[in-house]
Image: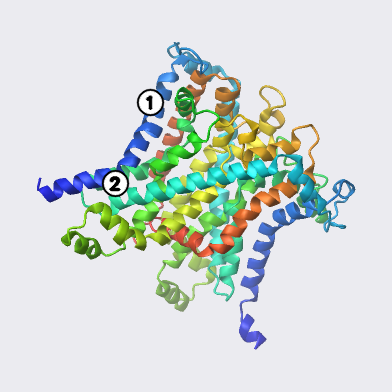
């Protein structure tokens, strides 16, 4: 029986487990460090298994910086960017996938090509443009652009919509439904899985975003967690245990999201991989 | 044009209009505007003063520009091939037919979606030459641990290793590529007596060359844009006007653009840096595409 389960696959399993171990080590160290007190932090050689576990570090980490404020800000930014991505990309992808119009495919190739425009190219000029609009130190530069579509997400939803039978739309058109009705009552219910994939990727990306809030936000009370984490070393000493506790708290929601929606992540990557 | 065609054109444009507007306003206009700014001296306040090619002449005499370009190329040239090899290795492991393989796939993929700003802090703690776990492992094997944060010879190498935490993403794309290879190719190779190694180099590798190209282009783009890790590890280069890591070894190109534009508020000079970056990125991508014609197999 044991032989049947393991079969000849002992070696692949060992390799896989070793790989997972290597990928797990930095995160183990993050969590282990988060539970150490100062004596354990500075003991040499380092203690691999922290003991005692200092749970207080998590309380201290949250109190050391305005953690809750930063958390709320991160959530607001993430919600805004996710909503923007869901609304805009589903409309745009519909236009590129479900309506036959002259010049459509050429324009779509232009959209795909923009994936390869490195974002630093617009960095400096966009800042100046938003400054003229008095958008600096507001969430507008971080959220408004997400309502205008992102090429990769458009591509994902379009890819999905190409697989939905054309006859569905044609039947509705015969019945005299206009395009917006077809979109909202026929296609939208079908494209929910694709929109979910985009929502999840957009949420993770917004949560993880560092450079954009760094550039546009100046008032401390508006910072998201990505910027707020810098404060743990504001004074020349860095409290590594608090920093690691905070890092654990920041990483955790993404891990949770991943385990809840694993299927969507993997689907999203393979939807995107079709063109590879 | 028939009325139906006209209606479709109107509706189609209406649906994609958010993208057209965004493309024009957030991409085309800023790119052209930064071209205009690159010929000026401009602090972000008041008027931009025309200085012709001044910024571009200055750029060639600016040691920090060369340092940033060198660091970025050094990192990219190292990170791209290492990234491809690691991703393929992960994909091959993910392809093993063991029952719980989806759990391994999930675990190996997960780090690639975690926030880089947090991972960078974790990296600092993980590789600390005295108290870090990695250093402890080095000592376990009797090797003096390298200082990935303080020794300029190792800082970029360290970031290449850190980037491999994200290899699970491309690995899934490689996995999809490997799974798309018809089984009977391997079966007939096996009948001919080809071992695992020959099957890999004879079948798998040639048939995933399109994915390799895709990954190189993506890796090139990420590599040239490396920013967050360097910013976090060097604390934004706050310790001194131009320091970014020991001996400026982590002064990457985008970090230099950031510092020039937002710390020194030299928007004109930063725009010139941006345009040089744009052109270098394009040239490198075109070079890769041309070079790829020699080794990418499109017949499957």
Pointers 2 and 1 in contact (C-beta within 8 Å): no
| Chain holding disc 1 | B
**Labels 2 and 1 positioned on one and the same chain:** yes
Image position of A128 (left or right of A165): right
Residue B279 in the image: x percent, y percent?
A: 43, 30
- For label 2, count other residues whose C-alpha is less than 10 Å away and answer few (under 14), some (14-19) or many (20+): many
Q: CA distance from mark 2 to mark 1?
A: 26 Å
Say which element carries label 2.
helix
Give the numbered dot on residue B80. none
Q: Which residue is more in the foreground, B252 or B84?
A: B252
Which quarter of the picture shows residue B72? top right
Visible in this render: residue A214? Answer: yes
Identified at 44% across, 50% down, the residue is B213
Q: Residues within 10 Å of mark 1 (few under 14, many from 20)?
A: some
The residue that mark 1 highlights is B32
Quadrant the N terminus of chain A occupies: bottom right
Residue A195: horizontal and vertical position, in percent?
42, 56
Judging depth in this view, the residue of A72 and B94 nearest the camera is A72
Q: Residue at x 42, y 67 (%)?
A: B181
Q: Position of residue A192 (x, y in %)?
A: 40, 60
Which residue corresponds to the image point at 45% horizontal and 53% vertical from the top-left? A198
The answer to which of A73 and B207 lies nearer the viewer is: A73
Q: Quadrant of residue A176?
A: bottom left
For the residue pair A227 and B236, the one nearer the viewer reads as: A227
Q: Residue at x 36, y 62 (%)?
A: A189
Residue most extreme to the left: B2
Tag 1 secondary structure: helix
Q: Chain of mark 2?
A: B
Q: Residue furthest bottom?
A: A1
In the image, residue A8 lies at what x, y percent? Answer: 61, 80
Which residue in the structure is indicated by mark 2?
A: B15
Single out the mark in the foreground, 2 or 1. 2
């Amino acid at each position: 029986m044991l032989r049947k389960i393991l079969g000849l696959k002992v070696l692949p399993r060992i390799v896989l487990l070793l790989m997972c171990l290597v990928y797990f080590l930095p995160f183990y160290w993050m969590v282990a460090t988060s539970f150490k007190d100062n004596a354990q932090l500075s003991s040499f050689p380092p203690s691999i298994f922290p003991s005692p576990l200092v749970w207080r570090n998590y309380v201290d980490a949250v109190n050391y910086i305005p953690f809750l404020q930063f958390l709320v800000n991160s959530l607001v930014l993430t919600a805004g960017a996710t909503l923007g991505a869901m609304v805009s990309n589903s409309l745009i992808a519909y236009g590129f996938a479900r309506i036959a119009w002259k010049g459509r495919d050429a324009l779509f190739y232009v959209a795909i090509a923009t994936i390869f425009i490195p974002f630093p190219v617009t960095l400096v000029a966009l800042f100046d443009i938003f400054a003229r609009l008095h958008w600096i130190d507001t969430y507008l530069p971080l959220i408004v652009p997400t309502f205008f579509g992102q090429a990769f997400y458009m591509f994902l939803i379009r890819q999905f919509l190409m697989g939905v039978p054309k006859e569905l739309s044609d039947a509705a058109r015969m019945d005299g439904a206009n395009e917006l009705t077809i979109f909202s009552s026929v296609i939208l219910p079908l494209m929910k899985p694709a929109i979910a994939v985009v929502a999840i990727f957009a949420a993770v990306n917004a949560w993880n975003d560092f450079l954009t809030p760094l550039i546009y936000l100046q008032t401390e009370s508006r910072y998201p967690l990505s910027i707020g984490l810098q404060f743990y070393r504001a004074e020349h000493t860095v409290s590594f245990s608090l920093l690691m506790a905070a890092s654990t708290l920041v990483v955790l929601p993404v891990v949770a999201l991943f385990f809840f929606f694993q299927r969507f992540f993997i689907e999203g990557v393979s939807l995107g991989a079709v063109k590879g | 044009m028939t009325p139906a065609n006209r209606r479709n054109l109107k509706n189609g444009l209406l649906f994609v209009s958010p993208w057209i507007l965004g493309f024009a306003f957030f991409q085309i206009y800023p790119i052209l505007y930064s071209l205009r700014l690159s010929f000026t001296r401009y602090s972000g306040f008041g008027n931009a003063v025309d200085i012709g090619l001044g910024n571009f002449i200055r750029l060639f005499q600016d040691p920090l520009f060369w340092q940033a370009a060198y660091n970025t190329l050094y990192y990219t040239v190292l990170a791209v091939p290492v990234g491809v090899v690691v991703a393929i290795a992960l994909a091959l492991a993910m392809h093993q037919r063991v029952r719980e393989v989806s759990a391994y796939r999930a675990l190996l993929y997960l780090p690639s979606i975690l926030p880089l700003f947090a991972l960078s802090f974790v990296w600092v703690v993980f590789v600390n030459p005295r108290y870090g776990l990695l250093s402890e492992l080095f000592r376990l094997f009797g090797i003096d641990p390298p200082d990935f944060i303080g020794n300029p010879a190792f800082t970029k190498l360290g970031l290449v290793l850190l980037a491999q935490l994200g290899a699970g993403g491309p690995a899934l794309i490689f996995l999809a590529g490997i799974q798309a290879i018809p089984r009977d190719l391997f079966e007939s190779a096996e009948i001919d007596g080809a071992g695992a190694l020959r099957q890999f180099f004879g079948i798998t590798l040639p048939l995933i060359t399109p994915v390799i190209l895709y990954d190189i282009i993506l890796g090139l783009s990420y590599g040239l844009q490396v920013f967050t890790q360097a910013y976090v590890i060097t604390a934004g280069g706050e310790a001194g006007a131009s320091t970014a890591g020991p001996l400026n070894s982590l002064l990457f190109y985008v970090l230099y653009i950031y510092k020039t534009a937002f710390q020194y508020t030299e928007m004109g000079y930063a725009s010139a840096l941006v345009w040089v970056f744009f052109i270098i990125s394009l040239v490198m991508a075109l070079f890769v595409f041309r070079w790829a014609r020699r080794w990418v197999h499109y017949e499957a």
